């Protein structure tokens, strides 16, 4: 008899998690609770409820939660306050969603009296790390079932055979060869992996992309967008006040229209392998460019440089599943403190895959002083003679070294 009596399963209703649901029941003889998160993936989620009911899950044990506002407000926005980019390119669209899913899994486990959680992440990927580190950080005594590390259904063919054997409905596309890519979508991005993309030399087909037009087919006329910031977060677009989720939704639509935010990347996975993926992050790409622009006039130089030095470490924390760690939370406190005066607006021009900053201002917090920066007569605001002493002081150590070398 299994010691696990009730388990909360992160459930999408797709092939993998439908097989997992049946496998959990047969293997652990336990009660199942399903949790499906709406993170803005743009798919109808009610079919997941219907499928769960068909599998015999009690209605009170089916959770379909709209987490879009919480996702952007409490996860995406804090991450972008740090201008976070992993390995120089990746905007962490998958990584930043996992700590929220882990949080909700733990909350539902507590609410329903479950003693375990389960997920469909494979033993090859990063998501198993992110889900489980988050879960243990929030409930150190939770039990975790990772079927891909326990069962022998380690190929798509075996999953299909198991589904057929146990009467699990399989969509026609799976029977006919299936979707060519493994995809993950939320309000921040959509990612594509597998099949055709497993050859890093092969260009992705144009038909793969779902959110963005190709830059070649984007409108021939640029579009201007005014973005308003308050304490480092976007609060309005073109003068319209918006909620966090609405901000990202509109930025995605505008960016996608202009072919912005495509990325083809070979990344270094936490488990030690290189993995090729393609990503669409139109709204995040605009957000990052605009945020750096407003910081350029509101942040002290050394504070900005310190943030840039800390950002790769912060990005690695998120990528590697340490969102709920004390070090990430400590660093977040520092980042958030730097954003108190990041207020103002940025104007960008969107044109054929590009986000071009064409203006920025802050009425209350700008550190830009035109009377000092001007190339015209500054009427004594800045004494250029001061630069001579500054240069000599900074050159002193190099002059000493040069003199020593000349004596050799």
Image (tube, rainbow, N blue to C red):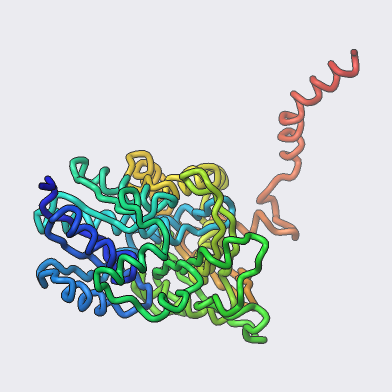
Q: Which residue is drawn at 42% across and 72% down?
A: 248
Instruction: Identify whether 158 is placed above or below 339.
Output: below
Residue 56: x %, y % from top left: 13, 71
Residue 254: x %, y % from top left: 51, 79
Q: Which residue is drawn at 62% across and 61% down?
A: 199
Task: State the residue lying farthest toward the bottom.
Answer: 220
- Is residue 183 visible to the viewer in this orientation of the structure? yes
Q: Which residue is drawn at 49% across and 54% down?
A: 84
Q: Nearer the viewer, residue 234 or 191?
A: 191
- Figure quadrant of residue 317: top left
Q: Which of 405 and 9 is in front in this view?
A: 9
Query: Horizontal placement of 206 versus 132: left or right?
Result: right
Query: Horizontal placement of 150 versus 301: left or right?
Result: left
Point out the image quarter for the C terminus.
top right
- Figure quadrant of residue 77: bottom left
Query: Horizontal placement of 67 versus 184: left or right?
Result: left
């Amino acid at each position: 008899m299994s010691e696990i009596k009730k388990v909360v399963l992160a459930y999408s209703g797709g092939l993998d998690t439908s097989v997992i649901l049946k496998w959990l029941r047969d293997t652990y003889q336990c009660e199942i609770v399903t949790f499906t998160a709406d993170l803005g993936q743009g798919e109808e989620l009610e079919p997941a409820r219907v499928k769960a009911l068909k599998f015999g899950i009690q209605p009170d044990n089916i959770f379909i939660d709209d987490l879009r506002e919480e996702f952007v407000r409490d996860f995406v926005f804090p991450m972008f306050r740090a201008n976070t980019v992993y390995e120089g390119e990746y905007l962490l669209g998958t990584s930043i969603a996992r700590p929220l899913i882990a949080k909700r899994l733990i909350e539902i486990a507590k609410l329903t009296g479950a003693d375990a959680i389960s997920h469909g992440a494979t033993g090859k990927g990063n998501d198993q790390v992110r889900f489980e580190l988050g879960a243990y950080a929030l409930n150190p005594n939770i039990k975790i079932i990772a079927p891909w590390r326990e069962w022998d259904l380690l190929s798509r063919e075996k999953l299909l055979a198991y589904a057929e054997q146990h009467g699990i409905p399989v969509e026609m596309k799976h029977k006919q060869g299936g979707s060519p890519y493994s995809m993950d979508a939320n309000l921040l991005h959509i990612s594509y992996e597998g099949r055709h993309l497993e050859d890093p030399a092969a260009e992705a087909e144009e038909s793969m992309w779902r959110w963005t037009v190709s830059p070649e087919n984007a409108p021939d006329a640029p579009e201007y967008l005014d973005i308003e910031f308050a304490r480092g977060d976007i609060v309005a677009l073109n003068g319209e006040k918006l909620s966090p989720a609405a901000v990202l939704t509109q930025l995605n639509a505008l960016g996608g229209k202009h072919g912005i935010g495509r990325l083809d990347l070979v990344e270094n996975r936490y488990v030690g392998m290189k993995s090729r993926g393609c990503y669409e992050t139109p709204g995040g790409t605009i957000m990052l460019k605009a945020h750096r622009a407003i910081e350029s006039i509101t942040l002290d130089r050394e504070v900005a440089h310190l943030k840039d030095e800390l950002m790769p470490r912060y990005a690695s924390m998120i990528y590697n599943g340490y969102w709920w760690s004390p070090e990430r939370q400590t660093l977040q406190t520092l980042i958030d403190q730097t954003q108190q005066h990041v207020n103002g607006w940025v104007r960008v021009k969107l044109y054929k895959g590009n986000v071009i900053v064409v203006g920025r201002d802050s009425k209350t917090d700008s550190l830009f002083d035109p009377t000092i920066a001007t190339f015209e007569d500054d009427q004594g605001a800045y004494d250029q003679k001061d630069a001579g002493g500054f240069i000599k002081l900074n050159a002193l150590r190099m002059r000493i070294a040069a003199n020593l070398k000349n004596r050799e």
